[in-house]
Image: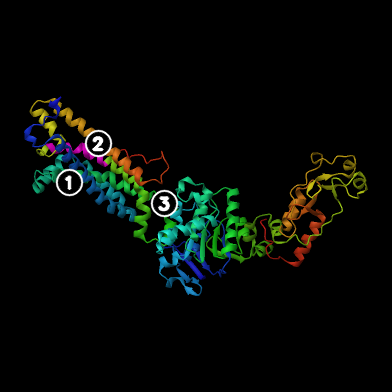
Amino acid sequence: MSGYFDIPSDLQNTWAGLIGLHLREALLPVLAGLVLALPLAQLCVRFRWLYPPVLGVTTVLYAVPSLAFFVVLIDYTGQTELTVMIPLAVYSLVVLVPAIVDGVRSVPQETLAAATAMGFGPVRRYLQVQLPIAVPALVAGLRVATVSSISLVSVGALIGNQGALGNLLAAAQKYDRPELAVNSVVTTAVLAIACDAALVGLRLLLTPWMPRGTATRRPAVVK
Amino acid sequence: MESVTKRYPDGTVAVDQLSLDIPDGSITVLVGPSGCGKTTTLRMINRMVEPTEGTILLDGTDIQRRPVTTLRRSMGYVIQNAGLFQHRTIVDNIATVPRMLGWGKQKARARAAELMERVGLDTSLARRYPYQLSGGQQQRVGVARALAADPPVLLMDEPFSAVDPVVRKGLQDELLRIQAELGKTIVFVTHDIDEAIKLGTMVAVLRTGGRLAQFASPAELLSAPADAFVEDFLGADRGVRRLSFFPSAALELTTAPVVRADAGAERFAAADAPYLLVTDADGRPLGWGTPAGLAAGDTAPDRLLPYGRPFVPGTDSLRAALDCAVLSPTGWAVAVDPDGRVTGVASQTTIGEAIRAAHAAGPADRAGVAP
């Protein structure tokens, strides 16, 4: 049993340390993606013509294999975490931008008209009406982005020791210790499930105003 | 409003040279078929739509001179389906404008609770969210929210068209009551001519293309439609509906066929009428019977003919009186006092004479009741 958690010394990390590293490499890009997606989505809502091209570009970027990104980025950012995190942030946009746009657009016309008629300016209206009502759709997008990001971090192992739990897969081959691969896969899956559950909890906390049992369905995007 | 026009860039004219003098402290209804520019007209008043030509004056000042948010916060706005903020509680929905105007949280919430009572909502709903309320309740919240900062002007855009007829009637009555209490200047948009006639002090009928067809009081509209379009829009039974504006107080009543159940067989047999209205000892109506039948002892309520729905002279209109007579199996309308005691009966002939007399005298003020 101890073999499962007996991490080879060349990884220079404990199991708990790998989990922390994995979460950081997976979640920071989603956060960065969110910060990028919010204004981008707002522009798409404001200027309708912008949405199709933005959607097209994010989809094309999503189609670029992470290995190709690494090849380009490695010249600038080297064999670092950043090289892994930049593609992940870019990938999250393909889920987050449409989620936020759909969420903001789902605000009923009469609610918007009522807000305008009550003297809400555009900024106040966005922050106090549109964004809060978009929260369920936004969280649904975050769930997909987070789970896919957690699973994708592992490819960082390809550029040498930047795959966090993914490095265990490489080590399993190198030292012929299959139990390390089992550790890697199970831990990653548990992390993904735990983060997903945390986001569901966050949504319930933020939206006491939603009828129970009608939560927005998660968009079906999987990589 | 002075010759206001709204023309869209593609050339569509939504409102064409519209001039209206909307009186203070009363309900002005804009009514017309879809595409007649009534909502556009309403939205020009709070500058959600800017007119292409013409000016809108509020208390003598051009509304363009006031900052748009200040203007809007001084006008309550009620919309179809209420347009509540689904992510805020009922009390916070109602307190929205006071909060924006800088009121303290406590004061705004106290005001919201006061308004909930005013529009007939139980204050126990304060902490609920909109999805937990029925359509009618949501609409009441919408009205309360519009009244929250005590604006002098209330704009209402088809506020009751998405609720069922029974709830709608309740909301209409409530609006008339609130209006009587608060004396707001209300501009009300509807496509329903009956609603317009019931609620309006003045009614502006608009035709497709945003042109004013007629601007008149409901009684005048019904008695003298300006043209074929207005007449057609009013519908086929405007003659009957117009009777709502004639009071029934002057109607000549007779007590000759009214008898008490315990009057005795001789009194019944001696009566000179085809039917007698039997009342209980308190004077409340029980039903109609023939003199012969009553003399034979058939005075039990289940042996009598139903008397239909009675009317109250003084509160009810001639329309209600006529309706009673038409519904009554004997053709006689039963008049009662506000406590339900019979004050007399009127035949269809008597009511017909009263209608002719009323027409000759011209339309009076609203009889003060629903048609």
Badge 2 element: helix
The residue labelled by disc 3 is B88
Q: What element carries label 1?
A: helix
Image vertical order of residue B132 relative to residue A48, above or below: above
Tell me if mark 2 has few (under 14), some (14-19) or many (20+) residues whose alpha carbon lies within 10 angstroms of its own.
Answer: many
Q: Where is residue B265 in the image (x, y as percent from the top left)?
A: 91, 44
**Overall secondary structure of the magenta stretch?**
helix
Residue position for label 1? A86
Specify the subunit that label 1 lies on.
Answer: A
Q: What residue type is labelled 2?
A: Ala
Q: Do labels 1 and 3 share a chain?
A: no
In three-dimensional space, the C-alpha distance between marks 3 and 2, rounded to whole angstroms, equals 32 Å
Residue at screen point 29% across, 48% down: A97
Give the numbered dot on residue A192.
Answer: 2
- The range drawn in magenta is A145-157
Q: Quadrant of residue B203?
A: bottom right
